[in-house]
Amino acid sequence: REESFGLHHPISVAALFQVGEMHVFMGDYAAAEPIYRKVLDRIQTIQGMEDIDKAYYVAEYGELLAYMEKPEKARTYFDQAMKIYKIIRGTHHLFNADKLDYYGTLMREANDLNTARAYQEEALQIYEKVLGDDHRMIADIRINLANTLAASGQTVLAWEQLTKGAAIHSRLINQAL
């Protein structure tokens, strides 16, 4: 595709990214990393700072770094992607909350518990603002946040979030019956 479209064409970049993704799916993160960096270098030349595709590629590189247990570097890319997502979608968009919760989970798995908590607390704020207090997604993020708090040894706060999340699920189940 590079021969047909050129190195910096969006189709060539997407094809290169798919090669990197195949390495990630196979668990070969070391092979994927230089490919993802090439994608980011190329995307800089063809798209502006507020482009949704760029945010996606930046976030995917952050995920790769989290899988590679490089949470400090991953956080940089997650923050850059979130900045773009917030410019494009607005600060309080459910997509942003979903991403923040997911990034929080990845950062918890990479043992960066402070960042994980910050991401998940921001996700909770967005969900509550958009959905109110009694929604399945609120319950789910509270349970995810409880897992992060428990992992950091904050069992009292973890229990509080877990019971709030479970109470929401219970109310929703009772309403459905």
Image: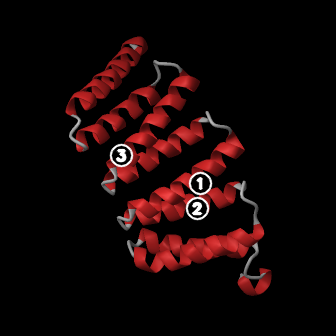
Report the mark closest to the observer, 3 or 1. 3
Residue at 49% of width from left, 61% of height from top? 62
Of the residues shown, which amino acid type is indicated by label 1?
Answer: Ala
Horizontal arrangement in the rendering, residue 69 relative to residue 19 (left or right): left
Report crowding for label 3: few under 14, some 14 to 19, many 20 or more residues within 10 A (C-alpha): some
Where residue 58 is drawn, which disc sits there? 2
Amino acid type, callout 2: Val
- As helix, strand or loop, the secondary structure at mark 3 comes to helix
Give the quadrant of the N terminus. Answer: bottom right
Spatial separation of the CA atoms under disc 3 and disc 1:
19 Å
Q: Which residue is mark 3?
A: 114
Nearer-N-terminus badge (2/1):
2
Name the image quarter holding residue 172: top left
Q: Earlier in the sequence, mark 2 or mark 3?
A: 2
Q: Is residue 47 left or right of residue 76?
A: right
Q: Is residue 158 above or below residue 20?
A: above
User: Does label 3 or label 1 sit earlier along the sequence?
Assistant: 1
Label 2 crowding class (10 Å Cα cut-off): few <14, some 14-19, many 20+? Answer: many
Question: Are discs 2 and 1 less than 8 Å apart at CB?
Answer: yes
Dot 1 falls on a residue whose secondary structure is helix
Mark 2 vs mark 3: give the one in front.
3
Question: Could you tell me which residue is drawn at 39 percent across and 53 percent down?
Answer: 106
Camera-side residue: 168 or 67? 67
Q: Which residue is mark 1?
A: 81
Whole-percent x and y of residue 26? 40, 73
Image coords of residue 173 (percent x, y):
37, 18
